[in-house]
């Protein structure tokens, strides 16, 4: 690497002043009733978002987020050199169709729910390397499209165990480039695929927690940092089950995560919303990061945050054939102006 | 009135078995449904399901176990007249009303609601 610097095997340190120049989110009705609602750019009052299918509704939300992120960066879509986007649907159709509408050179990503930080890390890398001046990155999920793809047909009404999670309906997008305003992207830690043999597709928190632990611990070792160096460390969508497991594992290993640790899947809904163990999906970490966390860094509420987006890399076919669920987590460090 | 209560309790208990299978095992909803259908076949095979219907009425005919009972009855009736081939042709003879109704009402429902979801 000419401009960047690699620390350890998995952590990248960016050398330029790479910032999130603008970011925006669009969500569905349930998210719009949650505790972060006032920080969201678009809240749709029904899950169809004025479209005639849920797939089109998801696409509408990604388009909302992408358009508003570009607008807030004071740039135009013609200035975007690359768009990096992904989602949970087969062949990432939400991203593909949105990229067609945008007319921006496009690289599709699939990292399941880790796509948000996969996109942000790669966006910063492209800017740092000089191959792009401005990069648009985003991802989306929709509860009803994810349900019918990964679980049961929505009209079937299958019961769920309490440790299951609720896929977030929403999309988030960010414009990344060199600039003087906005959260600075300083580091990214790229995760390895971890599979401890969990086979229950409802138990995502338990399956993904070890991947998040591996990435966070590697990050600490690569940078010689600890939890005390951050105002906030968030995981993408471990929910209450995975949140507790992650804290327990870190406690066993001598790190006290409690003062700084939270999970986007817990933050996005309030305790009285019936979402089982918490939120999940690509949209979960993207919506929280590109609204609440970016705002917090810009306002000075936070000075350094690590977002660790967790993804379960299974397909409906793999779990139906009884295979276990491989998981991954990618971490990105954002710093505020202070 | 007494008959209503018996139907309610017996039908409810069959559903409790299904709920316990959902909550206490790793079975999917499809596994639970199939298990209850097979249970209906087995009970009928031992001659126990018809007395249950006499006792509980709709409490025994409405739950999915009665589908197993109907499968067994159809297969057995055809087997008596056509032998081994009758088992195959008879399986869906009695339950065909239920299956055809599901298709017809599914179609009617799709005309009114949004089949795309």
Image (cartoon, coloured by chain):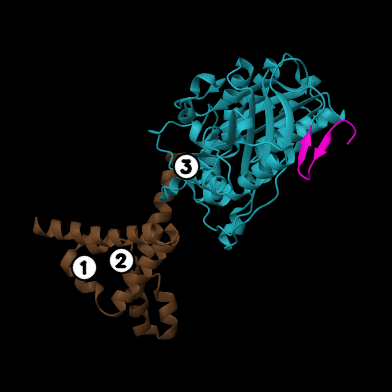
Chain colours: A cyan, B brown
Q: Which residue is mark 1?
A: B53
Q: CA distance from mark 1 to mark 2?
A: 9 Å
Subunit of label 2:
B
Q: Which residue is mark 3?
A: A240
| Picture coordinates of residue A189, whole percent (x, y) | 72, 39
Q: Which residue is mark 2?
A: B66
Identify which residue, A280 or A317, lies in the foreground: A280
Look at the picture and state if B67 lies above or below A67: below
Task: Provide the secondary structure element on which disc 1 rests.
Answer: helix
Q: Residue at x 65, y 53 (%)?
A: A194
Q: CA distance from mark 1 to mark 3?
A: 46 Å
| Picture coordinates of residue A229, whole percent (x, y) | 64, 31
Q: Crowdedness of circle 2 by 10 Å Cα count: few (<14), some, many (20+)?
A: many
Residue sitting at the far bottom? B83
User: In what quadrant of the picture does the N terminus of chain A appear?
Assistant: top right
Subunit of label 3:
A
The question of residue A2 being in magenta is answered with yes
Subunit of label 1:
B
Task: Provide the secondary structure element on which disc 2 rests.
Answer: helix
**Who comes first in sequence, dot 1 or dot 2?**
1
Q: Residue at x 43, y 55 (%)?
A: B103
Q: Which residues are magenta?
A: A1-13
Disc 1 to disc 2: CB gap under 8 Å: yes
Image side of residue A105 versus residue B25, left or right: right
Judge depth for marks 3 and 2 and give the one in front. Answer: 3
């Amino acid at each position: 690497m000419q401009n960047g610097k690699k620390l350890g095997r998995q952590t990248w340190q960016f050398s330029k002043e790479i910032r999130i120049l603008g970011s925006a989110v669009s969500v569905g009705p349930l998210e719009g009733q949650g505790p972060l609602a006032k920080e969201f750019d678009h809240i749709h009052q029904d899950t169809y978002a004025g479209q005639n299918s849920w797939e089109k509704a998801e696409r509408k939300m990604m388009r909302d987020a992408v358009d508003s992120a570009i607008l807030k960066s004071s740039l135009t879509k013609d200035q975007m050199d690359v768009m990096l986007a992904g989602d949970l649907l087969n062949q990432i159709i939400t991203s593909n169709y949105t990229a067609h509408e945008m007319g921006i050179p496009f690289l599709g990503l699939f990292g399941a729910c880790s796509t948000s930080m996969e996109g942000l890390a790669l966006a910063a890398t492209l800017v740092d390397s000089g191959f792009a001046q401005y990069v648009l990155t985003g991802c989306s999920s929709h509860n009803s499209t994810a349900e019918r793809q990964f679980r049961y047909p929505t009209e079937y009404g299958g019961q769920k165990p309490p440790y299951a999670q609720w896929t977030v309906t929403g999309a988030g997008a960010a414009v990344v480039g060199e600039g003087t305003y906005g959260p600075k992207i300083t580091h990214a830690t790229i995760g390895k695929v971890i599979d401890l043999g969990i086979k229950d597709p409802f138990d995502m928190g338990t399956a993904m927690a070890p991947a998040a632990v591996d990435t966070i611990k590697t990050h600490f070792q690569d940078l010689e940092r600890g939890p005390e160096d951050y105002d906030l460390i968030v995981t993408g969508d471990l929910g209450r089950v995975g949140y507790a497991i992650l804290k327990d594992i870190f406690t066993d290993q001598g790190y006290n995560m409690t003062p700084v640790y939270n999970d986007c899947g817990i933050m996005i809904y309030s305790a009285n919303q019936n979402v089982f163990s918490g939120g999940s999906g690509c949209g979960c970490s993207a919506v929280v990061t590109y609204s609440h966390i970016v705002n917090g860094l810009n306002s000075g509420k936070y000075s350094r945050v690590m977002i660790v987006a967790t993804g379960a890399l299974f397909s409906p076919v793999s779990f139906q054939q009884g295979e276990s669920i491989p998981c991954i987590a990618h971490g990105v460090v954002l710093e505020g102006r202070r | 009135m007494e008959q209503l209560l018996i139907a309610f309790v017996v039908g409810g208990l069959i559903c409790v078995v299904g709920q316990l299978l959902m909550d206490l095992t790793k079975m999917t909803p499809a596994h639970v449904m199939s298990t209850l259908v097979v249970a209906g076949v087995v009970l009928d095979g031992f001659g126990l399901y018809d007395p249950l219907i006499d006792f509980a009425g709709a409490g025994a005919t409405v739950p999915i176990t009665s589908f197993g009972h109907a499968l067994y009855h159809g297969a057995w009736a055809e087997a008596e007249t056509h032998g081994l081939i009758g088992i195959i042709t008879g399986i869906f003879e009695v339950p065909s009303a239920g299956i055809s109704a599901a298709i017809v009402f599914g179609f009617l429902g799709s005309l009114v609601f949004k089949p795309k979801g």
